[in-house]
Image (cartoon, rainbow, N blue to C red):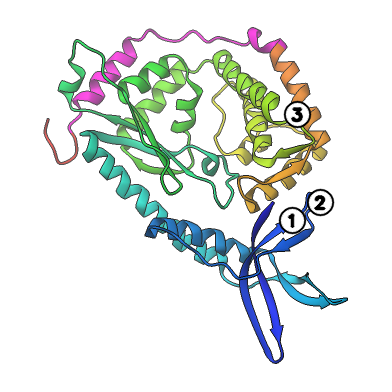
Amino acid sequence: MWNHRIIKKKNNQTTTYEIHEVYYDDSGAVEGWTKDAVSPFGESLDELKADLKYFLHSFKSPILELVLKDGKEILTEEATPSDIDIVHSSELIEREIIKSILERLTEIENENGVEILYAVESGSRAWGFESPDSDYDVRFIYRHKPEWYISVMPKRDVIEYPVSELLDFSGWDISKALFLLNKSNPVLFEWLNSPIVYRSNESALEQFRSASELYFSPKSCIYHYLHMAKGNFREYLQKDLVRVKKYFYVLRPLCACMWIEKHDEAPPMNFESLLQGLSLEAELLESIDKLLIQKRKGLESETADKITVINDFIEKKIDYFSEKASAFNAAEKPRTDKLDQLLRTLIRRPRKGCIF
């Protein structure tokens, strides 16, 4: 486990501050650091901006002073962290990244001959537990020109790109999105409720959200989240030392099941909003809060010892919903006529500044 830390060095009358990579043992104690200071690097401006963001997070931690003890160099922690305006600095970089996202969305439209109606954040940043090095998972719903939909042969209805410089873009055509809405697809519900929206055609979004209320099925959504929780629990949380982010890949879907059971509606995407709508024991909430802090401060590869109170909760809820899932309301949804009509409306709607 490692991160970037500021190291203070005194040499005669001179004091210097530099950023180093610092390495820790399983207990969190410092076990080593790079001999030389490190600096941001990138093969493009976007890579440099992303790398610089990691370095800025070193100002959130207490400064480490290099001292000599019994003839050996060690690092000791100062009482308070640096007073740099980390919030302002991070916001400047965040604005640059958002600018890159918006520019890339326009490029995607031009490359594919589509119009993006709605684009959101869909990963850990929307869930509210991103690490400094988390990707930006940009998801979008788009439409083609009307003639594209008049074809004997089926066409590809997704747009996907490889992850590049922390940016991950993929989207669905409106026909695929509405098809999945008819199946009460939880991923689509999450997109429609994302707290981070990069672009939105408000009229189209309102129509999608209105339709989503009619086609929401508690039963199918609980099965989806339960399957996700079971798989991640079985795959990642069986060892004594686990990756911190994997805990949330189990906790979030289980809490989503609890939300659906309690409120009979699609759960909020933000994890803390999700917790606030549930009645969890104080000891469990305290453990989850500590884990959230660790997740946000550490890197994606951050690990932690197995947390008994959280594991016990997970096992209990998996057993509970495994037994009860089949009894949940499947919800009688409307006929697909409504979605067919919505599809025709979205296809025919004039594009801004363009007449089809």
Of 113 and 29, nearer the camera is: 29
Q: Which residue is mark 3?
A: 238
The residue at 35%/20% (across/down) is: 176
Of 202 and 142, nearer the camera is: 142
Is 339 included in the stretch rendered in magenta? yes
Q: Position of residue 56 (x, y in %)?
A: 56, 64
Tell me if label 2 and label 1 are in contact, CB under 8 Å. yes
Tell me if label 3 and label 1 are in contact, CB under 8 Å. no
Decide which of tag 3 and tag 1 comes sooner along the chain.
1
Q: Amino acid at mark 3?
A: Gln
The residue at 68%/76% (across/down) is: 8
- Magenta highlight: main SS: helix
Position of 185 with respect to 3 (left or right) is left
Q: Which residue is mark 1?
A: 24
Q: Amino acid at mark 1?
A: Tyr
Q: Position of residue 298 (x, y in %)?
A: 65, 51
Q: Which residue is mark 2?
A: 27
Q: Secondary structure at mark 1?
A: strand
Mark 2 surroundings within 10 Å by alpha-carbon count, few (fewer than 14), some (14 through 19), many (20 or more): few
Quarter that holds the C terminus: top left
Q: Which mark is residue 303?
A: none
Residue 59, quarter of picture? bottom right
Position of 223 with respect to 346 (left or right) is right
Farthest right residue?
A: 70
Is 249 included in the stretch rendered in magenta? no
